[in-house]
């Protein structure tokens, strides 16, 4: 591990903006990355109230902050406020990271790419030509529809409680369609993007689909990472399926932003280690 220089006049700053943001794991993840590479960068959590996202962009220009991670409730407002959008952010009208190039601010959305990279790393194969079922149709689902399509999946089926939102998510990609839970069974990959099963969420310890739909051939992923082993993953594992938890997406979406800001390959192991170690709720 390289030595990180002490804070000086040359130190560069990145931050996560959101509300609430004090619980964010992003500072721990990114600072671990900077430390591992010996980069003279630091990362803070900055609480920014709803409606003040564009002011935070002005602050970035004025203060020379080099990168933002963007979380609730600013993802759409920041997409409107930056000078330029990368393709995924433009498709989604949503930004989860901003990079400053002089006075120009550029927005991107790395959540979906983070999911794809995490899954491909775990499976040690690409998802090209795979078929994928996505449970849910919120921001996370939309980012995965977009990224899965960009990364060459053959077919995407979106299953959601509210069918109109499912249709909006499926409209993001020509290979995507709306389906019912029973349509998930023949697919290769099934991913839960809802908060069902999340500790502290509206339906903790619940499962978003009938576990009878799960088979040993499936890869079952959950973007929920608290707890590590959601009920969906436990039921899938009990039926012999391959399972993938939510920490991978969390780390890989951060890694993609880290690489964009710093121009350096992200030290994935160091960044992942703090999530596992620093999370008292993990099981
Ligand atoms: P995010 O941006 O994190 O994806 P979101 O936009 O609030 O969050 O979306 C949450 C998703 O979880 C939606 O698909 C939501 O279903 P609806 O579109 O029908 O609201 C889904 N969801 C949340 N709670 C749920 C529950 N108890 N049962 C089924 N789906 C649920």
Image: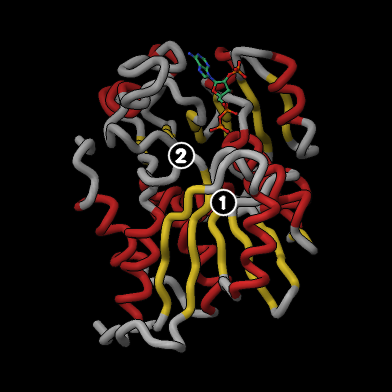
In the rendered structure, the answer to whether residue 110 lies left or right of residue 215 reads right
Dot 1: element: strand
Quadrant where the image shows the N terminus: bottom left
Ligand 1 location (quadrant): top right
Q: Position of residue 191 (x, y in %)?
A: 49, 32
Tell me which corner region of the image, top left, top right, bottom left or bottom right, holds residue 200.
Answer: top left
- Between 93 and 21, the one nearer to me in the picture: 21
Q: CA distance from mark 2 to mark 1?
A: 11 Å
Residue at mark 1: 70
- Between 149 and 128, the one nearer to me in the picture: 149
Q: Which mark is residue 53?
A: none
- The disc, 2 or 1, on the residue closer to the chain's N-terminal end is 2
In the rendered structure, the answer to whether residue 78 lies left or right of residue 118 reads right
Residue at the image position 71 percent from the left and 30 percent from the top:
169
Q: Position of residue 85 (x, y in %)?
A: 76, 59
Residue at the image position 54 percent from the left and 63 percent from the top:
257
Residue at the image position 66 percent from the left and 58 percent from the top:
108
Label 1 CB-ligand 1 distance < 8 A: no
Compared with 105, 169 (above or below) is above
Quadrant where the image shows the C terminus: top left
Residue at mark 2: 20
Judge depth for marks 2 and 1 and give the one in front: 2
């Amino acid at each position: 591990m390289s030595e990180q220089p002490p804070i000086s006049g040359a130190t560069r700053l990145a931050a996560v903006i959101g509300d609430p943001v004090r619980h964010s794991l992003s500072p721990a993840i990114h600072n671990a990355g900077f430390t591992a590479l010996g980069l003279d960068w630091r990362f803070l959590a900055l609480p920014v109230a709803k409606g003040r996202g564009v002011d935070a962009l002005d602050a970035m220009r004025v203060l020379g902050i080099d990168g933002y991670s963007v979380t609730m409730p600013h993802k759409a407002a920041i997409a409107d406020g930056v000078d330029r959008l990368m393709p995924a952010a433009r498709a989604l009208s949503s930004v989860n990271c901003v990079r400053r190039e002089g006075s120009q601010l550029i927005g991107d959305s790395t959540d979906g790419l983070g999911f794809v990279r995490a899954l491909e790393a775990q499976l040690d194969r690409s998802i090209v030509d795979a078929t994928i079922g996505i449970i849910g149709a919120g921001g996370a689902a939309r980012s995965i529809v977009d990224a899965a399509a960009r990364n060459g999946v053959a077919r995407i089926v979106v299953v959601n409680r509210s069918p109109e939102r499912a249709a909006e998510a499926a409209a993001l990609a020509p290979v995507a369609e709306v389906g019912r839970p029973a349509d998930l069974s023949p697919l290769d990959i099934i991913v839960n993007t809802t908060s069902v099963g999340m500790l502290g969420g509206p339906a903790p310890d619940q499962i978003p689909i009938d576990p009878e739909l799960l088979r040993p051939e499936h890869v079952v992923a959950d973007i929920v990472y608290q707890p590590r082993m959601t009920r969906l993953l436990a039921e899938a594992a009990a039926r012999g399926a391959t399972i993938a938890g939510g920490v991978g997406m969390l780390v890989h979406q951060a890694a993609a932003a880290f690489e964009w800001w710093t121009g350096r390959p992200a030290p994935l192991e160091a960044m992942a280690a703090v999530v596992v170690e620093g999370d008292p709720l993990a099981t």
